[in-house]
Image: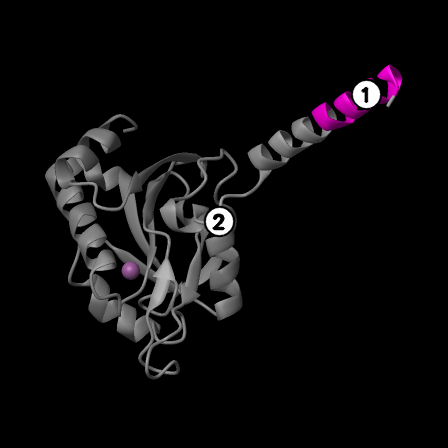
Amino acid sequence: MTRGAKVRIAISFSLALVALVIGYLIMPSPDRGRSGVETAGSLGGPFSLTDHTGKTVTDQDFRGKFLLIYFGYTSCPDVCPLDLRFMTDALLELGADADQIQPILITVDPLRDTPEVLAGYVAAYHPRLIGLTGTPEKIAAVAKSYAIFHQKEAGVADLATAYLVGHTTATILMGPDGTFLRVFSHGTGPAEYVAGLREHL
Ligand code: NI
């Protein structure tokens, strides 16, 4: 092998290595959907959904208020109840300051979570918690705009009626102008929650 050929091989090898490293860096992480939402400034977007009283509401109806948005579902056995409990406790702790914040639960299980089902559920948490549902297409679109992963879990007995829904467990704070502010991760306790909210109020 000539010296020239050796140099060419060395160069091709280096280029291949660089390509490999770049490929690794930009490769999407497979568990990103579960661990949390991307904290990009472009999070959120327009939506038109049905609230737990049967009324149509859009994102525009909430301009001027901070939005605390949680994606979950009423049949969730443990995760949603804990996060909604902590959210509620934090808002109650904030007292009158919480009036600037509209808490919202957007269901990731629209087939079972009708407005009637949501009405019974939100009543157990904050008195101003709004439950939103819609067609599966609308829910998929709004979840996507907030980078929320959600999927019916396989491996349960009756996929038609008794399923679980895997979903991102992050609570998203949006500003009064509709811009993304921050995320509260699953299990954030009321005290930490209050401190985090106060930073933005
Ligand atoms: Ni849940």
Q: Is residue 37 left or right of residue 81?
A: right
| 46 versus 49 height, above or below | above
Magenta segment includes 81:
no
Residue highlighted by disc 1: 6
* x and y percentages locating residue 151 in the rendered image: 43, 64
Residue 79: which numbered mark, if any? none
**Image position, residue 135 (x, y; %):** 48, 70
Disc 2 to disc 1, C-alpha distance: 38 Å
Q: Residue type at mark 1?
A: Lys
Judging from the image, what secondary structure is the residue with disc 2 in?
A: loop
Ligand 1 is in which quadrant of the figure? Answer: bottom left
Q: Main secondary structure of the magenta part?
A: helix
Give me the residue at 18% from left, 54% from top.
82
Q: Which residues are magenta?
A: 2-14
Residue 198 placement: quadrant: top left
Find the residue positioned furthest to the top: 3
How packed mark 2 is, by other alpha carbons closer than 10 Å (few <14, some 14-19, many 20 or more), is: few
Residue at mark 2:
30
Q: Nearer the viewer, residue 159 or 5?
A: 5
- Position in image of residue 124 (x %, y %): 15, 62
Q: Quadrant of residue 94?
A: top left
The picture places residue 50, in percent across and down from the top left corner, at 41, 65
| Closer to viewer: mark 2 or mark 1 | 1
Question: Which residue: 25% across, 55% down?
Answer: 129
